[in-house]
Amino acid sequence: MNDMTGNSDIALPALRSDRFRLERESDWIRLEEIVTKMEKGKARKLSDEDVLALPTLYRTLLSSLSIARENSLDAGLTDYLEGLALRSYFLVYGTQTSFGGWLKDFLGGGWSRAVRAIQLDIWIALSVMIAGALIGYILVAGDSDWFYALVPGNFADVRVPGATEEALRGTLFGGQEQDGLGVFAAFLFSNNAQVAILAFALGFAFAIPSILLLIHNMALLGAMLWVFAQRGLTADFVGWLSIHGTTELFAILLAGAAGIHVGRSLAFPGAKSHLQAASDAGKRAALVMVGVIIMLICAGLLEGFARQLIDNSIGRYAVGGAMLLLWLIYFIGFGRKVGAGR
């Protein structure tokens, strides 16, 4: 009888340890895989979900370790958890990577993966921007007075409804040393930079302000396009705009998509809590916005130099098209993991 009781006393902790392990082992295994990859210098091969999950998995591990110690569970299990906790600690709270290392990881695939993760929101933002440009074009085509409501009066000099072809063409070619359309270009860049930041910042209001902002901004462009289209200068105007516009408008597209992503996550959190959904979406969208700032800087350089140096539509289309192709190649194909569909 005593032997049976002794065996029972020995088996009970083992049973508790087995049950405890079965309930939590999947999280430990996932954490160990993440830690092992990071220790081997393969952090770039981690998915965004794994990187975001690392702190949560680490806290869960500490909770498991605390329970294992308090309940005197299997010594081997406790040793394993202590070892994994120590390895994880140095990765979660250890010395942070240098700025150069962070930038290398960011440009080496972190940014492009974040952009691909919000592709649904990018399609929504693109649809909204196209609709905004069409609205501006149609409104001014139906009543030219809408032009003055959409385009700031500071820039309504010769680029107004009824302007002659010669006057409009003069703002597109050969006038780089004068204010002309260059002032409007500077205005567009400043305005678009503000729109990009606001479109992201206002996303928390279920994305509605972000969408309205994109529509209004593109309506301005649609109104200006109509003015040039009436004199057969559509291709020349688009060429003038494309040098910096393919980068600048792409940046606005991503900023708007980032804002919509946050707002959509708040409105439709799915299985997550609203707070958790907003946190996850915010981290992903913030990574996209860091890249947006880089794109706006590139657009400013193109607007400040390339537009003045190239005074023909073919050259402008070549530069604008090359920049667009560069961004598409980077966002669509760069930073993908071998064998992954992300």
Image (spheres, rainbow, N blue to C red):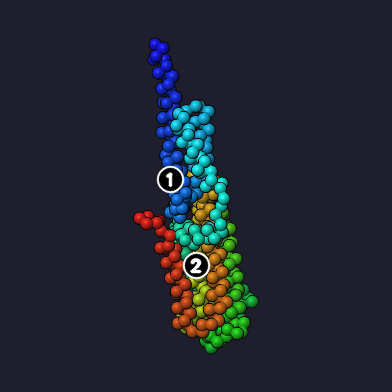
User: Which label was assigned to residue 33?
Assistant: 1
Q: Residue 302, located in which quarter of the rendered image? A: bottom right
Q: Residue furthest right?
A: 154
Q: Kindly report which numbered mark, 2 or 1, lies closer to the viewer in this rendering.
A: 1
The residue sitting at 46% across, 36% down in the picture is: 80
Q: Secondary structure at mark 2?
A: helix
User: Residue 169, how many percent across, how many down?
Assistant: 53, 85
The residue sitting at 56% across, 74% down in the picture is: 301
The residue sitting at 52% across, 35% down in the picture is: 63
Q: Residue furthest left?
A: 339
User: Residue 50, how many percent across, how many down?
Assistant: 46, 48
Is residue 273 in view from this perspective?
Answer: no
Packing grade of label 1 (10 A; few <14, some 14-19, many >=20) is some
Q: How many marks?
A: 2
- Reading the image, the residue beneath label 2 is 250
Q: Amino acid at mark 1?
A: Glu
User: Residue 48, how many percent across, how many down?
Assistant: 47, 52
Q: Secondary structure at mark 1?
A: helix
Question: Left or right of 2: which side holds 153?
Answer: right
User: Residue 91, how many percent across, how many down?
Assistant: 52, 47
Mark found first going from the N terminus, 2 or 1: 1
